[in-house]
Image (cartoon, rainbow, N blue to C red):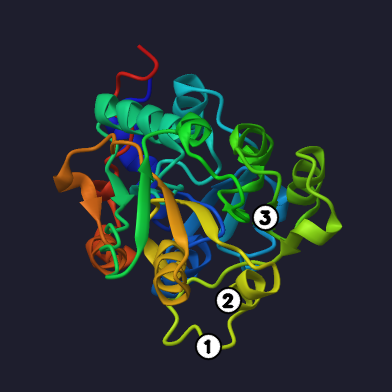
Amino acid sequence: MIAGSEAADAAAAPGRRPSIWLLGGTGEGPLIVSRLLAAGWSVQISLVSEDALRAYPSHSRLQSRLGALAGPGAIEAELLDAPLAPFRWVIDASHPFAALISADLAAVCTRGGQPLLRLWRPPVPQRPGTRLILLDQLEDLAGIDLAGERLLLAIGARHLARAVALARTSACFARILPNPTSLRQALAAGLGDGALACHRPGTEPPASTAGSIERALLEHWSISAVLCRQSGGPTEQLWQQLCAELGLTLLLLRRPAEPLPESGLWPLEELLAQVGRPEAHWGAESAQVLGHQLRQ
C-alpha cells in the first residue's frame, strides 16, 4: 500500500514534473500529446501496437507503454509502478468502441480516487438525404439484404473477417490503416489487393470532400453502401457527408454506452482546459494518485 504522504513526497520530489497517463490511439491521441507536451507535462501513452507509436512525436518527456492492458490488475499495477507514476491525471482517449478497457479503467480509477478524464466525441447529426441503417451490433449485418450492393467496410481491420462472413454480398472492399497488422488481417478476411486501400484518415473535419481519397475510392469501386462505426469525430462525419452527397446507404454501428457519467466526459478543448498546465499542480497537493486501496 502507498500511503498518502509517501505519494505526496514522490510528487513533490526535486525535479519531479507532474505527469499524465494517456490511453489513446492514432485519432486524437497524437494531437493531445503534442498539446500536453507543449504545456509542460510529462506524458506516458498506452498504445496497443508499435504501429500506432509511429504517429507520435519523439520527446524527452514522452514515454510509451505498448501492448494491451490485461484487465483491472494490469491497470492498477501501471498506476502504481509506472516510471512516471503517480499521475496527476489519467486521460482516456481510447476509441469509443474499446468498451472493455474504458470500463476497467473507470472502475479502477473510481475505486482508487485517481482523477480520470474521458474524451467525449459528440455524436454526428444525421445529414439530410442520408439513407441510414443503424445496427446495434455487427451481427445485425446478417439480417440486411445487400444483394447486388458493393459494400465498403470502414470498421477497422480487426473486424473485417467477421463482417465479410456476415455481409450478404460478394462485393466487399475495405479502407484500412497503412500498417502490416491491418494488411495481414484484411488479407486473412479474404479481401484481395484490388479490394483494399491503405490510408490513414485525417483528424480534422474536411472543409470539402472534393478530390478526397475517400471520395475517389467510393467512385473507383462503384460503392453503393458503407459500413462504419458511430464513433463521432471527423471520420464518421466524413462518411456521413460522402454518403449523403453520393446517394449511398450508410450502415452505422451504434456506439457502446459510456462507462462514465456525463460529468466525466469532456470534449477535446474543454478536456485540455481542465488539465491546465503542470505548474498549477506542482507540489504535495498534486499527489491525488491511487488512493490507498489498490494494494490493500
Quadrant where the C terminus is found in the figure: top left
Q: Nearer the viewer, residue 198 or 259?
A: 198
Residue 24, above or below 82: below
Q: Spot the residue most to the left.
A: 263
Q: Residue at x 24, y 37 (%)?
A: 260
Q: Earlier in the sequence, mark 2 or mark 3?
A: 3
Check disc 2 and report the residue beneath it.
215
Gap in Å between the C-alphas at discs 2 and 1?
A: 7 Å
Gap in Å between the C-alphas at discs 3 and 1?
A: 20 Å
Check if mark 2's residue and mark 3's residue have beta carbons within 8 Å: no
Secondary structure of the residue carrying tag 3 is strand
Q: Spot the residue most to the top.
A: 296
* Amino acid at the residue labelled 1: Ala
Check disc 1 and report the residue beneath it.
210
- Residue 154 occupies quadrant: bottom right
Q: Which mark is residue 220?
A: none
Looking at the image, how many numbered discs can be counted on the residues? 3
Check disc 3 and report the residue beneath it.
174
* Amino acid at the residue labelled 2: Arg
Question: Whole-percent x and y of residue 67?
Answer: 65, 37
Gap in Å between the C-alphas at discs 2 and 3?
A: 13 Å
* Amino acid at the residue labelled 3: Ala
Question: Whole-percent x and y of residue 168?
Answer: 60, 38
Q: Spot the residue most to the right.
A: 193
Q: Nearer the viewer, residue 93 or 189?
A: 189
Neighbour tally class for label 3: few under 14, some 14-19, many 20 plus, Cα within 10 Å:
many
